[in-house]
Amino acid sequence: MHDATPGATPADAMAADDTHREFPGARTPDRSWRLDANGVGIAINEWGDADAPVLMCVHGGADFSRTFDVFAPLLAAGGWRVVAWDHRGHGDSDHTHLYSFDADLRDAVCVFDAVAPNRPVAVLGHSKGGAMMTTLADAQPYRFQRFVNIDGVPYRRPGPDLAEHQRATTLRADLDGWLAHRRRTAGNTRKPGTIAELARRRGAMNPRLSTEWLEYLVTVGARHDDDGWRWKLDPSMRMGGFGPWRPEWALYRLAGVDFPFLGVLVGADEPMGWGTRPRHVEPYVPATGRLEYFEDLGHFIHIEAPEMTADLVLDFLGDPR
């Protein structure tokens, strides 16, 4: 951060901060394009040879595809065409009037249809992206060749089953709460700041990641307005950002996966993690799957330890050809 000079205005300070940050191993996507997903513009980024076998990478909630800027090139070096997209309301994809887990799944299907029609591909999902892909794998397994889920197996202790009329009441409460939140926040704008300020804000949710990485992330995931930098994430998106949805739904669907599956779990607790431990998941791991647990690493293991995580993933995926 540059020190202010005598007589400098806030705009001058912002201009001094208008620089691209570098980060070791980070690489701009080799290709970027947009897809019309039933009227919603979805931003797609790719790394690797355009003719290589496809590996879909699905980011988590409040993230965006450029969070793979270090991890994706490592996977591409293993012979894959890595394809990642910004979920609606995230990154460079369109903002919409409403958001839901099902809407994200519909967008994902559009991306799969555009990139890999009529053939199964390798898929990797992190956090919310892992939960999304578990749900899609249960509904449309023919799209999957192999599946890696990085700390995206949400766990909540299952409660007792509910009578039908109680389920309907619970869903109504979820929907009412989600719509009320949208009405309160529909006209909101994000608070501006310098690169360092935005990095500090995100650091509260990503405490294990370095300042250098967080500042780099601002320059690829925020926009620079006249009054400062703002994250591109729709300001109506709250923590989770899935709409009416319950984490255990993805856990139950995991048991139906019938192709090779790798689940990666971590032990370091942090704000955006699920707190899932192997004992929570083991009863649901399919016969075709296995778990790897890293007690001393956190929710963003693919950013915290990218080389090790990439080696694990590439070994599981095998020869891309």
Image: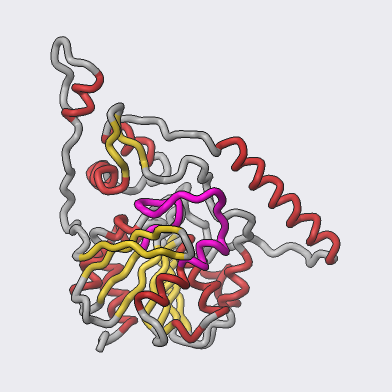
| 257 sits to left or right of 41 | right
The residue at 36%/62% (across/down) is 85
- In depth, the one of 77 and 189 nearer the eye is 189
Let me know if residue 32 is in the magenta part.
no
Query: Start and end of the magenta stretch?
Result: 85-107
- In depth, the one of 231 and 77 nearer the eye is 231
| 213 sits to left or right of 245 | left
Q: Quadrant of residue 245?
A: bottom right
Question: Visible in this render: residue 145?
Answer: no
- Tell me the quarter of the image containing the N terminus: top left
The residue at 19%/31% (across/down) is 17
Residue 46 picture location, percent across and down: 26, 67
Residue 82 picture location, percent across and down: 28, 71
- Looking at the image, residue 182 lies above or below residue 301: above
- In depth, the one of 14 and 106 nearer the eye is 106
Let me know if residue 104 is in the magenta part.
yes
- Tell me the quarter of the image containing the C terminus: bottom left
Question: Visible in this render: residue 256?
Answer: yes
Residue 210 picture location, percent across and down: 27, 45
